[in-house]
Structure formats: C-alpha cells, structure tokens
Image (cartoon, rainbow, N blue to C red):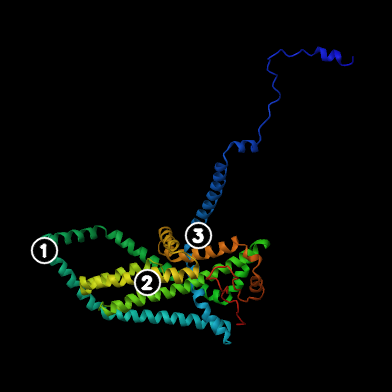
C-alpha cells in the first residue's frame, strides 16, 4: 500500500512518553503588556506624559527667567492695555483719530498717576517732621520700659547694646554698600522696564488686533481657530481681572485710609495710596500694607489706637475675602479663592513680587483658554469668524465662562490714524 511502509518506519511513541517540544514562540510586546496590571499601565501612561509636561514647563520657565527684564514689561503693558482700552475705544467712537485717542489716553493716565504721587509726596513732606518727633518719643518710651519694666536694664547696658549694634553695622559696611549698589542697579532696570512697558502699551492700544492676528498666523492652519478663540477668551478674562482688581484695590484703600483718618492716624492719604498699590497682589497685599498702617498707628498714637487699626484692617480683609473676592472676582475670572491664594503663594515663591502680581492673571488666562479648547468651542463659535475677519467684538455663547462676555482686543476698531 503506498505510504504504508513510510508510516511503518515511524517508531511508535512509548506509552506515557512526553511529546517532543515544537519551536519556541517569541512573545510580542502586546503579550508582555498583558502581564502588567491594567492600573499600572494607566499610571505609567499618565506618569510619563505628566513628567514630560512638567519638564517642558520647567524648561520654558527657566528660559523666560533669563529674559525677565523683557517679559515683565510686556506683561505690565498687557495689563495697562486691558485697563485703558475702553477709554481709547470711547474716544474712537467719538471720531477721534486712532493715534490721538491713544495719546490722550496715555497722557491722561500718566497725568493722573503723576498728580497722585505729587499729592502723596506733599503729604509725606509735611507730615514726616511730626511723625519723626513721635517716633523719637516712642523710642524714649521703649528705653524707659526697658529700664523700669521687667527687664530692669540699666542705662549702661542699653548703651552697650547700642554700641554693639553700631559695631556690627561697621563690620558689615561692605555688604551694605554692595546692597546699595545693587539697589541702584535695580532702580536702573526698573526705569528701563518702565520705558519698555510704556512703549509696548502704545502699540498694544494702536495695533493690538493686528499683532494678535500675526501671532495666530504663526500656528498650523488647522490649529488657528482654536488658538484664536482661546487667546481672545483668555484676553477677556485678563481684562476682567484687571478691572475688578482695580475696584477691589480702591475699596481696600478707601476702607483702610478712611478708617485711619477717622481714628487720627497721621499720613492717612499716603497710607491709602500705599494700600491701593499693594492690593493689586490679591489677598496678601492689603494685609501687608495694613500691617504698616498698624505700625504707624502704634508709633504715632499708642497701643489702643493700634488695636483699633487692627480691627479696621481685619474688617476690610473680611470684606474682601468673603464678599469681593468670591462674588465679584470669582464671577469675573471663574477662579475659586483657594486657587487665587495658592497661585499667589506659588508665584511669590518662584518669582518674588512679579510672580505674586502676575500669578492670578496668568491663571485666569490659562483657565479660560483651556476650558475653551477642551470644550471645542471654536467649532460652533460663529462670532469668532466675524472677529477674525472684520475685527468686530465676539461674544461668548451660552454655557461659557460668566466673565467672558466680550472678546475685544485693543485696536480692533481702530480707524485710520
């Protein structure tokens, strides 16, 4: 029978023998992944992506820190442009040429700031002599308490401590001199940054829409609608933050300044201006400047007056923390007070005073832009196309940020200069 002999030649397997192993199969990456628990795979996927984001963010912050002398003036210019753009638009609507409208706005703003500083300087000049005398009297009271109080320090011991402090100052005179030179260099950088900020503000008000469209065109074509809409929405949040923070700073300055004037604290007007400037750092600035008001009351009028000033500062802080920040600021930029205080703390730790000042605006811009992109709002944002082609203001649709009701870049309605 054909094939029978061949079949007979194959030796029969012994009963109970293990069959010969075939060729070993190499396991693929998919097979290896199946051996890893699902939760571990998800955690690893999240880990390397988050690590990459943190690495890129850290590198970007490091690079920007090297040119902070340019970044900070540009950010100041953006805040000023958002604050002053309504005045410029109002002048344009009344048939004032674009260049003249920007010039009138900036000159008026500079004149207002200069007048306020001049008034404060005059108050300081007239009240400093009296305050200096009160400070010397306070020092004498402290010396009397040291001598007659529980410490029972003699005049010789006090003189010894004063001489030791003087000697320490003399030994560290080189450090003090280098610190003074550093301050002079910082003042020079501040003046240069102020000029850059003023120059950039002029062009933001003149051609803000044109500058933004140029930046959008640098993006890939498919990403331009999303970038355009997110940028406009972020700009609106920053403008809302600037205007509301201006109102909050005015309320803080009015409360602490008027309270100081009522209880007879000297230099109440300069103190109010200081509180107004410090309040642009949310939640923290007014508290620090309020501490200065308490110290001033203590030196000038004594302990009881200082305790009353503490009550006034705490009352203003409660008004800001429980009414202005949650109700007014929260609705304007859609940020929780916890997010505000954490961003201020992180910004001050990373970049000092500039970080504390710009942390909340940056967070507000990022919040609005991310929500816009995550919701793919540009796909049904009909007015975004109108704003992109005609320079007209685009309004947020239903379900968007409550503070993003108007998307209007400075210079969008600029006429012919």
Q: CA distance from mark 3 to mark 1?
A: 55 Å
Of circles 3 and 1, the one toward us is 1
Residue under pointer 1: 147
Residue 188: percent from the left, percent from the top? 41, 68
- Name the N-terminal-most of marks 1 and 2: 1
**Quadrant of the image occupied by residue 166:** bottom left
- Name the N-terminal-most of marks 3 and 2: 3
Of circles 3 and 2, the one toward us is 2
Q: Are marks 3 and 1 in contact (CB under 8 Å)?
A: no
Of circles 1 and 2, the one toward us is 2
Is residue 186 at least partly visible in the picture?
yes
Image point 68% across, 29% down: which residue?
25
**Quadrant of the image occupied by residue 43:** top right
* Secondary structure under the numbered disc 3 in the rendered image: helix
Residue 78: percent from the left, percent from the top? 51, 71
Image point 64% across, 36% down: which residue?
31
35 lies above or below 416: above
Residue under pointer 2: 319
Is residue 267 at least partly visible in the picture?
no
């Amino acid at each position: 029978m054909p094939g029978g002999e061949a079949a007979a030649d194959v030796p029969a397997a012994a009963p109970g023998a293990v069959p010969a192993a075939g060729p070993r199969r190499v396991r693929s990456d998919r097979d290896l992944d199946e051996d890893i628990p699902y939760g571990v795979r998800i955690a690893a996927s999240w880990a390397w992506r988050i690590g990459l984001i943190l690495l890129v963010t850290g590198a970007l912050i490091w690079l920007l820190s090297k040119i902070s002398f340019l970044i900070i003036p540009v950010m100041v210019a953006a805040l000023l442009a958002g604050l002053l753009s309504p005045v410029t638009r109002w002048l344009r609507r009344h048939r004032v040429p674009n260049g003249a409208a920007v010039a009138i706005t900036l000159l008026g703003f500079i004149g207002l700031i200069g007048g306020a500083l001049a008034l404060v300087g005059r108050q300081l000049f007239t009240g400093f002599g009296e305050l200096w005398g009160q400070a010397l009297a306070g020092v004498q009271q402290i010396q009397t308490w040291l001598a007659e109080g529980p410490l029972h320090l003699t005049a010789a011991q006090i003189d010894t401590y004063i001489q030791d402090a003087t000697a320490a100052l003399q030994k560290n005179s080189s450090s003090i001199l280098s610190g003074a030179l550093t301050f002079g260099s910082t003042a020079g950088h501040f003046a240069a940054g102020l000029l850059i900020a003023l120059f950039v503000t002029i062009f933001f008000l003149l051609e803000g829409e044109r500058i933004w469209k140029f930046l959008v065109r640098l993006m890939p074509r498919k990403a331009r609608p999303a970038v355009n809409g997110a940028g406009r929405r972020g700009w609106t949040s920053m403008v809302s933050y600037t205007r509301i923070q201006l109102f909050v700073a005015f309320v803080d300055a009015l409360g602490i300044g008027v309270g100081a004037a009522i209880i007879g604290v000297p230099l109440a007007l300069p103190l109010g201006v200081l509180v107004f400037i410090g309040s642009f750092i949310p939640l923290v600035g007014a508290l620090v400047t309020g501490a200065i008001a308490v110290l001033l009351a203590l030196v000038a009028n004594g302990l009881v007056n200082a305790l009353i000033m503490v009550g006034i500062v705490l009352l203003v802080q409660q008004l800001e923390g429980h009414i202005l920040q949650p109700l007014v600021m929260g609705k304007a930029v859609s940020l929780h007070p916890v997010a505000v205080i954490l961003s201020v703390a992180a910004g001050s730790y990373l970049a000092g005073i500039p970080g504390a000042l710009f942390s909340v605006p940056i967070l507000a811009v990022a919040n609005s832009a991310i929500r816009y992109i995550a919701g793919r709002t540009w796909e049904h944002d009909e007015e975004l196309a109108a704003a992109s082609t005609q320079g007209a203001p685009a309004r947020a649709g239903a379900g968007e940020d409550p503070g993003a009701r108007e998307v209007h870049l400075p210079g969008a309605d600029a006429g012919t200069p």
